[in-house]
Amino acid sequence: MKRCDRLHNNDNQFQRVVLIIGYFTKGLSFLILSIFITQLFSEGGHFVEPHLGLHDIALLIFIPVVYSIGAFVSFKNKLTNSVIIFISFVGFNVSLFFIDHIGFSDIQGTFILAPSILFVALHLINKNEEVRFDEYNKLYGEYQDLNQNYKIIQGMMDITPEMLKDDNLDNLLQVILTKAIDVIPKAQTGSILIKNNNQMVYRAAVGYDLDLLKEVNLQFEDMYQYKLGNLYEPTVIKDIKTFNEAYLDPKKTKYLDEQGALIAKSVLTCAITVHNEIYGFINLDNIEDVDAFQDKDKIYIKHLSQQIEMALRNQVLVKDIYELSKYDMLTGAFTRQQYASALREVYEKAKKHKTVFSICMVDVNGLKLINDAYGHDIGDKYLIHFSKIMQGFIWESDFLSRIGGDEFIIVCLDCDKICAQNRIEELRIKIAKTPFVVDSISVTITFGGGVASFPEDSNYLDELITLSDQRMYIDKKNQK
């Protein structure tokens, strides 16, 4: 692609050189032609005795006319134009030389026709060159479009790692918008609005204060595309302030103007669709030129919106995968892997800030009996029932994890050993009051629980986990 750009630039430089040579040759040709016409009938000139025979008339009229065409007609292809000038110049003067020195009258006709034949041949070559040049321009235009689309696709591919790092939609939209402004020519600022029922909410912005834009109460009917009756196709709006004054509520227009959101001279906008439904709109702005965006830019932003749709679909898939890796499918509690990561983070913060936390190991009693008597499907419902009670019981700062078939851990932040033991007892009472019902039989759920606190029981995380596990088994044994 870069090689094609270099060839195009080299061709432009060569054409400029040829154009200068052409102007010089035209001037020289005009001078020589003037001298020839002056000398044509003068004494001692081409005709020793001035007269106008048939050959003389042809020589006087035909060759200068052909010569003048070659010298003064402008062609799109400057190289061909210069070649015609040169050959016409040479052909004409060679003809005069032979006529002057050889003297055969019949040779006049031959050399009178020579420039004409050359001119016709070169005219055909010129037409062919024009076709080739048009084809080149067309191909170069297609190359530019492909190159631009490649940049868009590459830009969207660059976003994929960001989706894997962060499942936050607003962060993803901000990254997409920044990349869009980077790959779309003439785009300087922009925004993305997402549809929420009938409300349109600003979720990303470049060049504007996003917090202020979020305060604007925009309806779906306020969108540019809706006003123009063209929801799904890209649109260019020139002078956005005038457009909004004509179509938008005056209060909303005034507020947007006060926030500096109507400074754009030209706006390129397109709908973002997901599963053929309007998901939102992306607006790319140019704040300097009302003619900044052209029809080809509509193709680019349409392609970009399709790539955004793919990115959003991927984001949903990534979020689903993230949820599967983070949460236990059956109970909704943290998975063992997520718990280990979260607990390590709590532990490091507690050491740094000298705070307390407690680990509460919980093991459900009676799961095997339920499985044996009613099957594993009922056993799963038994665990789900128990998990829901715990999730409704724990504090907002706590987190619950399922680390085995019937084993759970509650991590209680800012809760010492006595606090955690009291909460375990409160949980026993709450669960006892909410029995599990199967085949019209109420089954009271019990569990073994063990508590270990940082830093009271240990300063080491592994020891805390081991202690809470040991105390849980002691509690289960005491219950039996």
Image (spheres, rainbow, N blue to C red):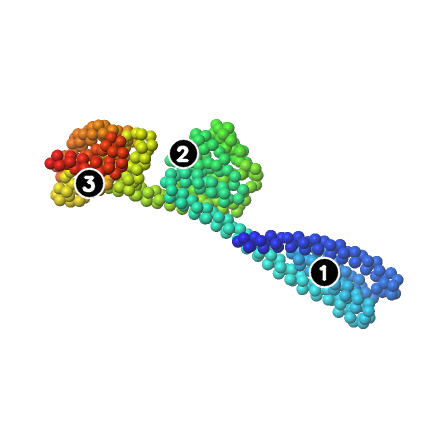
- The answer to whether residue 330 is visible is yes
Mark closest to the chain's N terminus, 2 or 3: 2
Picture quadrant of residue 422: top left
- At 21% from the left and 36% from the top, the residue drawn is 467
Q: CA separation, marks 3 and 1?
A: 97 Å
Going by the numbered disc 3, the residue's amino acid type is: Asp
Question: Quadrant of the rendered structure where residue 291 is?
Answer: top right
Q: Are discs 3 and 1 less than 8 Å apart at CB?
A: no
Q: Nearer the viewer, residue 394 or 261?
A: 394
Q: Are marks 1 and 2 in contact (CB under 8 Å)?
A: no
Work out whether residue 457 or residue 465 is closer to the camera in this orientation and state it. Answer: 457
Identified at 53% across, 44% down, the residue is: 185
Seen at 50% across and 33% down, the residue is 261
Q: The C terminus appears in which quarter of the rendering?
A: top left
User: What amino acid type should be assigned to the residue bearing mark 2?
Assistant: Gln
Q: Where residue 42 sits: x, y (%)?
A: 87, 60
Which residue in the protein does label 3 denote?
A: 406
Q: Secondary structure at mark 1?
A: helix
Question: Can you identify the residue that label 2 sits on?
Answer: 199
Residue wearing tag 1: 86
Q: Secondary structure at mark 2?
A: strand
Image coordinates of residue 119 in percent, x first then y, are: 70, 62
- The CA distance from mark 1 to mark 2 is 71 Å
Q: Earlier in the sequence, mark 1 or mark 2?
A: 1
Q: Amino acid at mark 1?
A: Phe
Task: Give how far apart the Cα atoms at labels 2 and 3 are.
Answer: 45 Å
